[in-house]
Amino acid sequence: MTKLTAFAPLLDRTVEIGFENARIVSVSPSDSKTDLCIGPTLFDIQVNGYGGETCKLCAPEKKEALAFITALMRENGVGWWIPTVCTGAQNSLETAFRLLGETLDEDSDTAASIPGFHLEGPYISPEDGPRGVHEKAVIRPANWGEFQRLQDLCGHRILYVTLAPEQEGAVAFTRQAVAAGVVVSMGHSAMTREDLARLVDAGATMSTHLGNGAHDMIQRHNNYLWYQLACRQTYASFISDGQHLPRECLYSMLRAKGLDKALITSDCVSLGGLPAGRYGDVEKQASGRLCAIGTNNLSGSASNLRECVECVIPMGGVSHADGWRLASLQPAKVLGLDDRLGLEPGKEATLTLYRYRADGPHIEVRETWVGGKKVFDAETSPRTAVREENVNIAEI
């Protein structure tokens, strides 16, 4: 049996966790003195790319990108993550999901860190603002037949879909998706309260990166941000990278939604982890902000989920334990994976061991375990070099 002893913020005590055959078998109080913390692994449910690679695979030789990104995620304490494929033409989406599915079929180690995939669009609002940087020309009505084709190609691994409630066919699509065990999230939308109510009634359970993918100017009282914050049947994800939501906005939104209905994600793109500088038409500033050259307009997130936890604690005014929970147990709960992730006997030994310093705050990842296997050790694992030369600005 493998045993790890550390302070567990989610349990508010030092514990000895024993596991074998990939499962936790015991969690016992410990009087040991340690400067280490332990938690269920960080789980990022929205990753577009990282370290110079993208998740939207376009050719067989790009399949290695998933293993590469997985290594970088694990080094940052993210043992689970969800590759995201955004709006595209049907043939582009089919290629991406076929290659994603083949990759996990062929690489069991990478597959252990990827519970499934996320389709963001193409069934979203075509309006400027809500559609974000999604390509307008290929935004289209919700199409269950097309989605089933994508599911077949990737081995039925699409866990959730982001769509706009007002898009044609969204309600019928949602009913079919939920019946098939797929989570439906609302996002990139200019929905009315009636649109929201119809989709929630059909089974939608989440809002994607609430506060972003929206108009710059909206009516102050009657708008889709308030509607989603007030909805008690749904969860909401927030990008807590310090760039997408100002401090006061993140603080207020977390409280309006409630920590029990919130989770955080990075929504990172391929420039994540790369040094500051100019990459084609995009600049990564020293602060980590990605902008179109000559503007302050966001061009995606460059943070990983560990950094988002470091941001959400001071910006959101939450505790160390709640910051970790928002990035681990809450995402698992939303996607129906909370039977696997946790700190109780019977749960998977999928854990992150780290040092926590309150000033900053700062999280120093020491070990990442996935299914009882140590997949990163700060003492012995070589660090993965990012790939600045691989960045394709069209994919950000």
Image: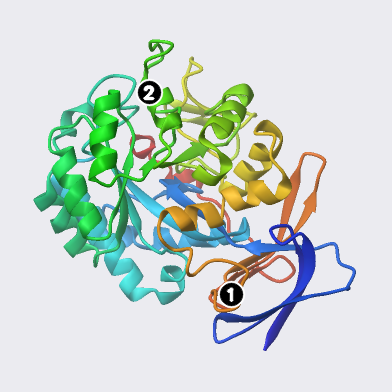
Up the image or down, 272 lies above or below 6; here it is: above
| Left or right of 202, for residue 253 | right
Quadrant of the drawing holding the C terminus: top left
| Left or right of 186, for residue 138 | left
State the image coordinates of residue 315 (x, y, percent, origin top left). Answer: 67, 31
Q: 293 or 190: which is nearer to us?
A: 190
For the residues labelled 1 and 2, say whether their Cβ atoms are less than 8 Å apart: no
Does residue 163 appear in this view? yes
Residue sticking out furthest to the bottom: 1
Which element type, helix, strand or loop, lies under badge 2?
loop
Q: Which residue is mark 1?
A: 349
Q: Quadrant location of residue 111?
A: bottom left
Q: Quadrant location of residue 179?
A: bottom left
Which element type, helix, strand or loop, lies under badge 1?
loop
Check disc 2 and give the amino acid type. Ala
Quadrant of the drawing holding the N terminus: bottom right
Residue occupying the point 37% across, 15% down: 222
Q: Which mark is residue 214?
A: 2
Q: How is the image coloured?
A: rainbow
Q: 324 or 299: which is nearer to us?
A: 324
Residue occupying the point 56% across, 46% down: 304
Residue sticking out furthest to the left: 145
Q: Which mark is residue 92?
A: none
- Label 1 to label 2: alpha-carbon separation: 39 Å
Between disc 1 and disc 2, whose residue precedes? 2
Check disc 1 and give the amino acid type. Ala
Does residue 263 appear in this view? no
Residue occupying the point 45% across, 41% down: 269
Q: Residues within 10 Å of mark 1 (few under 14, many from 20)?
A: many
| Left or right of 146, for residue 208 | right
